Amino acid sequence: MKAYEKVIEKLLLICAVTATLSVILITIFIFKEGISVLSDYGMINFIFGTKWSPTNGNYGILPLIAGSLSVTIGALVIGIPTGIACAVFLSEVAHKKTAKILKSAVELLAGIPSVVYGFFGLSVLVPAIRQFILPIIQLFNEDASTSGFSILAGAIILAIMILPTIVSISENAISSVPIEYKEASLALGANRQETITRILVPAAKSGIISSIILGMGRAIGETMAVILITGNMPKVPGGMLDSVATLTGTIAMEMGYATPEHQKALFAVGIVLFIIIMLLNLFANFTLHRLGGQAND
Amino acid sequence: MIKRILSVGLILVLGMFLLIGCGGGQESAAENNVPEEETLSGTIIIAASTSVQPLSEELGAAFMDQYPEVSVEVQGGGSSVGVKSAADKVADIGAASREIKESEKSYGLDEYVIAKDGIAVVENPDCGVDDLTMEQIQKIFIGEVTNWSAVGGSDAEIVVVSREEGSGTRGAFVEITGVEGDDGDMTTANALVQPSTGAVKQTVANTPDSIGYISLGALDNTVKAVRVEGVEATNENILNNSYKIARPFNYLTNGEVSEVVQAYLDFVFSAEGQEIVGQEFIPVK
């Protein structure tokens, strides 16, 4: 008996070590490949340079950072309210049967490959923005123009892509709030809407925030869909209808053709992306921890 | 008790899979190292730029029909990858869709021009401009001309569509049209960038007032090719050098080639091989 257990224990250990080791190896590899460009070109020049033109030796990635962040923030602005509203509806408002059907429909979204989202965006969303959104903007600003490849298109597609994550985790969190909270609130005379907004959602906030963090991770890391619809224009954007290039998209597009120096620069872009994601995660975990702590008090 | 036996059994089975998996990997690695013998069997690995890849695959398939013992593997990548793979001997043949750069000459590779390809300047079918000079094309892509009215069209902003940095098509296009000047590639920062020929075509086809460039071989009626200096983008015009925007497809080998690779190269330049080239590109013989 004991021998079996030991074998299993060792196997589990190997699995755990493999995962950790992969992370460490990947990190070392990215830094090893990219760090020379960062030090030769200068960290400040690299991060705050506004010109990305590798064939000419210009490696300023501010436009790419701005692109990635603007698309991600746009996706969160659209996706968070929709996702939480959807989660509340599924767990509190809808009938059980309806909720079941709707929930599996939303979860199906997670199974669609991202290139399909991108293609949908390219053939539906991009022309729609040019035809319907642009005239509305032009009412306020006559000089506005867009090809349709824009932050807005990217944000909408990414919002749809992160919905399943936000909805299913938030829904679980809201559903697992102890029933006593709800009963007490109703017994004290609060109506259904007050119960949801004042009791259930705040009580489930740590789960909801986790769902947002995961959604954000997916949005900033998404590559294929974004390449197809944001226009990949390495320029600091001035508005929602401008085209942008993202960090991930640029790496994916240019890696195949890159000369050695260019390739190192792309690894350096990878380092920056890595650090941005680490910072976002740290920040999110910190927020989660603080809010979670308060909820338990 | 039963549970434990089951789980140990499961682990054993998984372990077996792992071993089998490893074994398989070694086997296929060994296969590549088999010396290519008189019977003309073996593996040819071609590292091609994405423009040469489809052509190489077709040539490879036809070659394999003739010599069933031979396996031709075509890997995609960029022209730079093609050159580097040949130089590092990672591949038997490297394929590049551009002239070999001065910096790459030092590898001392043998170059074979297997085909020529023209780059068509394409615009949205609803665009009114049919004819552009090289200078106009250069100015549009540099961003000096931003309105169709400046080149004889209607008053509409030009949407420039380009390829990604490092792309062979982009490299060839900017070099030939003079978009690449003393300061390097000067393509306007206001250009949309698409990562493949297909994506450029799709973008130009669906975006009003847009202009882009694609391989002539990929041209179809979803987009409109403009005449350059009054010359239409056709095979004849490229071979007689009257159409200006054209490039060679190069096969590169490093040092002495094996028998099977030589046989493949001979096949590419045979009538049959060049006929395959001619289906989409411009044969050289």
Image (tube, coloured by chain):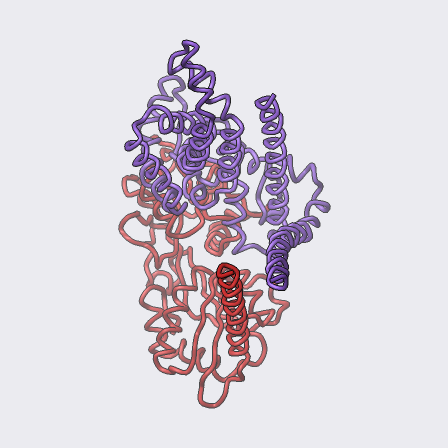
Is residue A214 among what the camera can see? yes
Q: Give how far across and how far down residue A68 sits, in percent.
A: 53, 36
**Rendering coords of residue B283 (x, y %):** 37, 69
| The C terminus of chain B, quarter of image | bottom left
Q: The purple chain is which one?
A: A
Residue B111 in sight here: no
Q: Who is closer to the viewer here, B71 or B156?
A: B71
Where residue A168 appears, as percent x and y from the top left, is: 42, 35
For the image, the number of numbered tags is: 0
Q: Quadrant of residue B186?
A: top right
Chain red in the figure, letter: B
Image vertical order of residue A79 relative to residue A257, above or below = above
Task: Please tell me which residue lies in front, B129 or A106.
Answer: A106
Residue at the bottom extreme of this rendering: B38
Residue at x-position 56% and y-position 67%: B85
Q: Quadrant of residue A192?
A: top left
Q: Nearer the viewer, residue A178 or A170?
A: A178
Residue reaching furthest top? Answer: A189
Horizontal and vertical percent for residue B34? 53, 82
The answer to whether residue A248 is above or below residue B76 is: above
Q: In this view, does A94 lie to the left or right of B80?
A: left
Which residue is painted at 40% across and 49% down in the image? Answer: B213
